[in-house]
Amino acid sequence: MDRVTDWFGFRRVFFTVAGKEGFLTQPKVTQAGKPWIWRASFPDFHAEIDKALLAAGWHIGYLETGEMLGCDAALDLWDAFYDEVTKNRGLAAKPALEAVSRGGLYAFRYAARHPERVAALYADTPVLDIKSWPGGKGKGVGAPSVWKIAFERYGFSSEAEALAYAKNPLDLLPVLAKAKIPLRHVISLNDKVVPAEENTLEAQRRLKKLGARMELVTVAEGTPESQGHHFPLPAVQESAEFFKRHTQGKSYHTLRRGLKAFGPKATVAFLGGSITFSQNGWRDRVEQWLIARFPQTQFTFIRAGIPSLGSVPHAFRLESDVLAQGKPDLLFVEAAVNDPSNFTTPEKMLRGMEGVVRHLRQALPGCDIVHLHFAMPEHLADWKAGKTPQAVGQHEKVAERYGNPSLDLTREVSERIAAGEFTWEGDFRDLHPAPFGHQLYANSITRLLDAALNAPRTPQPLPLPRSVDTRSYAAGRYVLPSEATQLSGFALDPAWQPTDGKGTREGFVRVPALVSTTPGSHFTLKFTGKTVGIMIAAGPDTGTVECQIDGKPHVAGAIDTFTPWSPGLHLPWAVILADDLRLSEHTLTLTLLAKHNPKAAGTALRIVYFLVA
């Protein structure tokens, strides 16, 4: 029967394996592929790295083997623990090992026994030679009582046999080098208990001769009371990233050309809908991760999430909502939920997303872009039927053409729900995720960032590729409603707000709007471009319009601006009137019609911006 306790807010589940007690400390949101870290000793010492990994979705495993000092019998118990947690509890087949002090005997000897099971090995002041500790046969203080235990555990019949033992971790380094197991050590240079010269630094010299290397972090002096063996743990975040880098589990990102490193100052922009707008959601968690991961970088964040908006409005508001706020080094963009929700056609999904990317590349060639595809029930149904969700497919065409990294969370959520890891109703609960979903998103996004920032990258600036669609909204911009002329029945309200008590969206209320409620009202707008549209507040009484361009009726005919959400919300709604024009000066004439959607309460039109590209 498992026993559960709390460990710094995480569930620690105890169970028995081969007569020994072990445990798994569980993350609140498990990472895809169930990666895990296997602690060899002292499971609560220097636990800062474990806490960081648990927050990111990793499990932490431990088996209590007392003072077995990594002997063969202890490794047999480790085999049983490995079988239990991988076969019966579903964890990944290749954990990373985490060793502290005497834990080095367990971790290195197990890695040599089963190199195929070990993804990486991190060690904190590790023992790599029993002659050094507990033997004390070199410069170390040794531990005579433990040296006697070593004789019992290893079956030595004499001092000479113990000193001649040839299966210490140092002796087994050729096996680890051949298997190319990544190594990272943290040591104290004045350690008198486990002297660095006899252990880690000797290992480093031997590895160099074998053509291998280890990452090494050194502390000049450990604490006097520990004889230099203990110290405040340095480089916690970097060590956590070492584990993540080598125990990724299953990934749902595509790196393409990667990302450039951050400098001393960096601006990161978030362009999206309500999931990006959410407070204490994935965006906040990624911001916090960036600050912790890159402490030498001073970050500025541009938060351009507006509920209900997808790729088409993103393309037209990029200039005002992102570029006018700063010069981003990295942009996250998401629209896979709102594009189909807003009935955006496949062509417009592509034209909107390419509009964002191409516009940004023209304005800031060095800015990196990451495409995020968030999940909704319709996406899960598509994957279940063996289809790529339409918005994801269109956005991926743009990401591929421009070499941008992307993360398909629609597929991750779908596959992991199908595998029984969690449920939509119980864990995500909605396309606006519960905290569980936001944490899952943040975990996968930071995995992408780790992988992309560590991967080789094509130097910037890259030449701008050929357009995926020459009608993309790459020249998209907002035009103020005050630019309209020849107003008949329309008037400019300098700070429009509804009087019906219905909901609004920030940025689309108490702002100038061109307003009419009278059928037959009309106006004209002169513009230069290939595309024209309107950005409206589509409320309960929103009506139907028709337009002429250059004096000729547009082929779209009457355009209904009422939406499924209009009865309860003055929704920001992008209406593309024409995107097939020649690049030249044009005149738009727009008329408000008497007929309207039967569900609409009137014939109103409230234009907050014109859309021109």
Image (cartoon, rainbow, N blue to C red):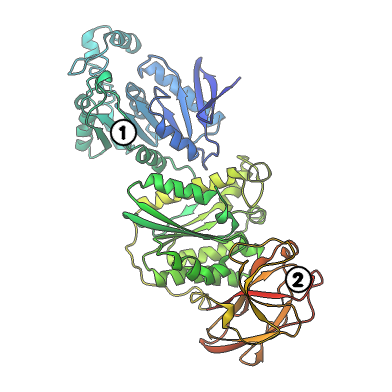
Residue 547: % across, % down: 67, 85
Compared to residue 164, the image places residue 54 above or below, namely below
Quadrant showing the N terminus: top right
Q: Residue furthest left?
A: 139
Of 234 and 16, which appears nearest the observer?
234
> Are circles 2 and 1 on residues that touch, CB within 8 Å?
no
Residue 283: % across, % down: 51, 51
Q: CA distance from mark 2 to mark 1?
A: 71 Å
Residue under the point 45% across and 18% down:
64
- Disc 1, SS: helix
Residue under numbered circle 1: 176
Of 169 and 297, which appears nearest the observer?
297
Q: Is residue 143 visible?
A: yes
Residue 259: % across, % down: 38, 57
Compared to residue 407, the image places residue 224 above or below, namely above
Label 1 is placed on what type of residue?
Leu
Label 2 is placed on what type of residue?
Asp
Relative to residue 510, is residue 369 drawn left or right? left
Residue under numbered circle 2: 541
Residue under the point 75% across and 65% down:
500
Which label sits on residue 551? Answer: none
Q: Residue furthest front?
A: 494
Q: Residue furthest right?
A: 598
Residue 298: % across, % down: 36, 52
Residue under the point 49% across and 77% down:
475
Q: Is residue 579 visible?
A: no
- Disc 2, SS: loop
Relative to residue 52, is residue 381 drawn left or right? right
Relative to residue 116, is residue 14 drawn left or right? right
**Quadrant of residue 188 within the rendered picture:** top left
The tag earlier along the polypeptide, 2 or 1, is 1
